[in-house]
Amino acid sequence: MRITNGYQMLTHLKNMNNALTNLTNSNNKMSSQRRFDKAWENVADATRAFRVRKQLSSDSFYMTNIRDVQGRLDTADENIQTVNTILRTVDERVVQALNDTLAPSDREKIATEIEGLQKEVLAICNAKYADKYLFSGSGGKTAGAPFTTYEQEVTVNQDGVDVKYSRSFLLYHGMDVNSLSKNETTGEIEARQTVNVLDRNGNPIRAKDANGNDIPILDGSGDPVLDGDGNPTYKFVTVDSGKEIPYDKTNYVNIGLGYTVTTDANNNQVINPESAIPYTFSGAKMFGVGTNSDGVSNNVFNFMGDVVQALKGNNSNRLDECLDQIPSISDTLLVGLTEIGSRSNFVEDMNNIITTDVQLMQETQNKLEGIDIAEEAIQNKNFEMAWMVTLQLGAKTLPSSLFDFMR
Amino acid sequence: MGLRPTFMGFETASRGLTINQKAQDVIAGNVANLGVYGYTRQRVDQMSMSINNRNTRYALHSALAGQGATISGVSQIRNTFLDKRYREETSDVGYYDMLTGTLEDVYNAVDEVQPEQLNSALSKLRDAWGEVVKQKGDEVSCSGVLAASRAMTQVLQQLDAKLANVWDQQKYNLNINVETMNTALSQVAELNSAIKKEYSALDYTGGYYGPNELLDQRNVLLDQLSSYGDMRFETQSDGTVKVFMGGHTVVDGESYDQLNLQDGASDETVKLFWNSTGKNVNFTSGALKASVEMLNGKGIDGKSDKGETFDNGIKYYREKMDVLARTFADTFNKSIAICDPNDSKKQLVINGVPQYKTLFTFDASTTGRGAGSIRVNPDWASDSSYVRDGIVRDGDEDVSSFELIDTYFDDKEAKLDFGEFTGSFTGYVTFYTTTLLGTQKTDADARLKASASVQETVEKQILNVSGVSVNEEAADSMRYQKAYDAMSRVMTVLDDLLDKLINGTGRAGL
């Protein structure tokens, strides 16, 4: 085969270029620590790498949400524990007050103490986490503080004298807590009100007895109750109206359970509750609503108000009834704590799962996108050697020709 | 035996000297042209002289034997078959080289490996919507989502601008190539005319002796031309070469055709046609074919009446960004309901169609709805609380529509319809910028490597056949030198003979 200088040069140049290209690529990889800089250098790995990146980004999104939920759960837990402690203090004081040897002035002191504790409880019910009310249900800034109070004058009998004082009653988003009730089957809080049925002109309709006569309202001794103008009052037809509690929806955040959408009873698109975690708390559920058969409130704040009223009126029977109510209120608080506890455990588990996932994804990402330093260093040395050899050989073989040896 | 001319030997000897001197000249020429690109080694064709003695009746050929040698011509050693193969491979290399270069430009515009453009903006947007859910649409979170949405539209606009830039650059590149090719065509025709004037007698191989340097120049030009488009050439009997490209005669003797590049049937297409016929150029390979494919290619939606083709070109990938922008806008424009002005608890419904707030609009001053024209609705841009629907469900704090938005970003759950693709935004981005584009480029790279490798092999063969081998020239040089020495000795001997004859014969005793 005829070998020409052109052929030798071409071959040598191509070899040099190849060796230099390999060496340069290897140097690039060593300094950037990346296996590929452009996706087309390794399409399969790049596609996989992008999926891993997306997963890592989603994981970081979920972790933020988890941290938020965890914070809310922890704060709610602390607050309810505090209320429980206060309740125990009230328990002790009531037991103390039931001791007949106490003087009325001492009972007065206990009443004042409990009124002070009541204010603490109100503050806790309106507790915030990161500038947002914790127990506000789904309410936000416009909803404002979930718990407010209204004043009403009540009468107590002190040594046979009727004394009036102003007492605070609790409102949850503007609804009287004592008039709310808990549906035993669903566990949801409802407002059951008795309202008058109105006729076409907006006037209440009078109830009729079996003979079609109006039914007058009578007092305890059988005398008709008179209104302001001295006219007898009559019973009206009433109906039970279930009213919607405001802000009682549950809000969800995505913590990586596989967020799905479903349609609810009203054919609206909503988040499937099994695919996300709720992070709202209904203050009404947490702190109790309604009254029991004795008329003592199930709600912590109102209950304490009942205790204060009983103390001020020196009403031992009433105090007894209050003492009997304490376990029930404690139960309500504990149920809330349990729910928070189980949610907290679940969130903790998700936290662990996602943290593990993040580690795995990072390892995979390293394998896909990062170089193996040891392997690459060896390759680099090989390429460098190949380059040096190519240079030396070229220098040796190219110049000599027959002309050099002619005499 | 017949008569022998007395001074016959001198002619032979002097011819011998001349031939060897000429051979040395050619060797010197070869060695001097060692570094010249495209130089084909030349060789002195010597042949033995024979005087035709058919007409003499009495002299036998032996009387006139020994006339010596003469030069029939200086020929080039070149293999036309290798040339043909080389030019075929060069066309392919030209095609894949242009293809791979353009794809790399497109890729660089939409590169998501580093830094992330779309993926990063989408991730920030997701975070912003998440905050809106958690903060129940308060002022800070609403401003945040407005800013993130605006950033997203800006990324889309940038991508569109970059791809438009790539298109412009490729068109400019094509323009330059067309001009270069046109110049080369005219030069080939000129060389044809010059070569034709100097062509002479047949050589051993049936080819012609011609002006070798001009032939070399023409071959270099033909090689160059073959990289622009598929080429076929026929050497004519008068020494000119007839060149066909894309099935069309581009050079015929001294006449040549020119390429014309113009804007195509619609915006951003090009039309490449021959000056002489006005017909569109139809190359089967070569850099110009790749250029036109990349410029006019709009994928399977290409409309030929608009001058578009079915290749996945620059316009195809630009259209993919447009589809992303449209789907993005359409999806978000169906997520926040408009409150019925007459009933604050319900969504506004007109003719049975529920109404949603327009979050993203398209700038009317640019053509079409696409990545270049997507904008945040000015109503929203001026008031970040626009995203709150105002529908009274539990007061005006209902965040259920915000909650639903996160599903668009979930890789597994999102089933957004992009036409050719169904999935999430990031899935779409990865599919087109990485998988599809990356595969197309890798494919082109592999074909380029294969073609270049074959081209290199052929090139080496050509060099081996036609290149100058210094060692060979040195050996030849020695041979001719020895022959020259021998001839001069022969001349000296003949001179002695004649001297003897003329000066020493017939004069006795001197």
Image: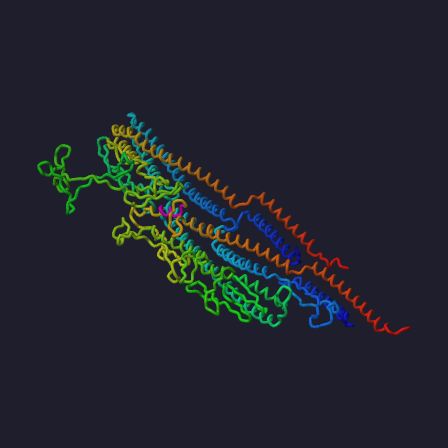
**Residue A158: x %, y % from top left:** 24, 32
The residue nearer to you, when weighing A338 against B320, is B320
**Residue A9: x %, y % from top left:** 65, 57
B253 relative to A103 in the view: left or right: right
The image quadrant that residue B470 belongs to is bottom right
Identify the residue at the far bottom of this view: B507
Q: What residue sits 8% from the left and 37% below the top?
A: A211
The residue nearer to you, when weighing B98 against B204, is B204
B69 relative to A98 in the view: left or right: right
Quadrant that contains the N terminus of chain A: bottom right
Identify the residue at the far front of this view: B58
Please give the range of residues in magenta: B403-410
The image quadrant that residue B212 belongs to is bottom right
Q: In the displayed structure, would residue B210 be above or below residue A321?
A: below
B208 relative to A189 in the view: left or right: right
The residue nearer to you, when weighing A246 against B168, is B168
Q: In the displayed structure, would residue B306 be above or below residue B120?
A: below
Q: Indicate whether residue B409 is drawn in magenta.
A: yes
Quadrant that contains the C terminus of chain A: bottom right
Examine the rendering and report whether any part of residue B157 can be seen. Answer: no
Q: Indicate whether residue A309 is drawn in magenta.
A: no
**Residue A53: x %, y % from top left:** 47, 46
Magenta span: chief secondary structure = helix
Q: In the displayed structure, would residue B132 be above or below residue B99?
A: above
